[in-house]
Amino acid sequence: MGGGPDLDDLGPLSEGEWAALRSLHHAYVEMEQELAAARAMAGRLSARAELASDGQGGPCPYYADAVGDLWGEALHYERKAGELAWRYASAAVVLGVSVWHRLATQQPPLTEQVVASLASREPTLGELKGALKGLYAEVIATQPDSGERPVDQEVHEALLSGIDRACINLTHILIGGRWVMTRPAAEPLDKPLTTAYPESADPLWDDLIRSALYLSEQLPYDIASWIDRSQAAETATTS
């Protein structure tokens, strides 16, 4: 098709599947941009708060207090933007993988109920891991071998490794240089990542979000390329 996959011509996808993928795409792209802006704001206010605290003690600490309070609010906003970016990107990964797998295995379109269930909430860690380790790995294994290690595969493995590390963080504590299990290993798999850790803890999505955003962004193109190849193969077979 010359210019690459046509994202406006995805015939085998149902209208509901494609509409949900597009809406999720707009959501996580917007949240990713807000996260970048929030990080810049929090970093700027952190520096200002440090400067304001110098020489601002005594009976009149108002300037330091004002900057410090605003910095705290910026940190809350940064965390929320990150949680939302992760929530929509991880949902897009699970939905995209499910759609691609059902195409590759010649299954009928996902029902409206299934699409809504996958798109309308953050997946549990178990659902995300299952989609990546099962469905995605099965589809990737059927792709033409170019002789090079696909970037998608590296990101896929990085995201899986990150999920495993997150589960260890949620079920173990570090004592004397050794990780000691405090909760059953499978317990975090039943929960979405953003609800699996306390609000006082550093966000565990921070190490995973780059990979999730890359995969969620790439999946529509992977699906479109797969459709292009399938349609070309059909044409070659019938001509």
Image (cartoon, grey):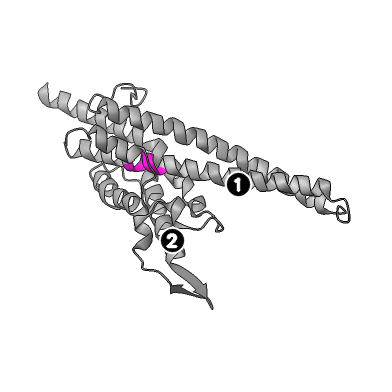
Amino acid type, callout 2: Arg
Q: Is residue 132 magenta?
A: no
Element type at mark 1:
helix
Left or right relative to 82: residue 184: left
Label 2, residues with CA under 10 Å away: few <14, some 14-19, many ≥20? some
- From the top left corner, tell me how far across and down residue 78 is, in percent: 59, 44
Dominant secondary structure (helix, strand or loop) of the stretch shown in magenta: helix
Which residue is pictured at 43% across the width and 61% down the height? 165
Residue 65 against residue 167 in the figure, above or below: above
Q: Which residue is mark 1?
A: 76
Q: Quadrant of the N terminus?
A: top left
Question: Range of the magenta residues?
Answer: 90-94
Residue 23 against residue 57 in the figure, above or below: above
The residue closer to the viewer here, 52 or 217, is 52
Foreground mark, 2 or 1, reads 1
Which residue is pictured at 62% across the width and 43% down the height? 39
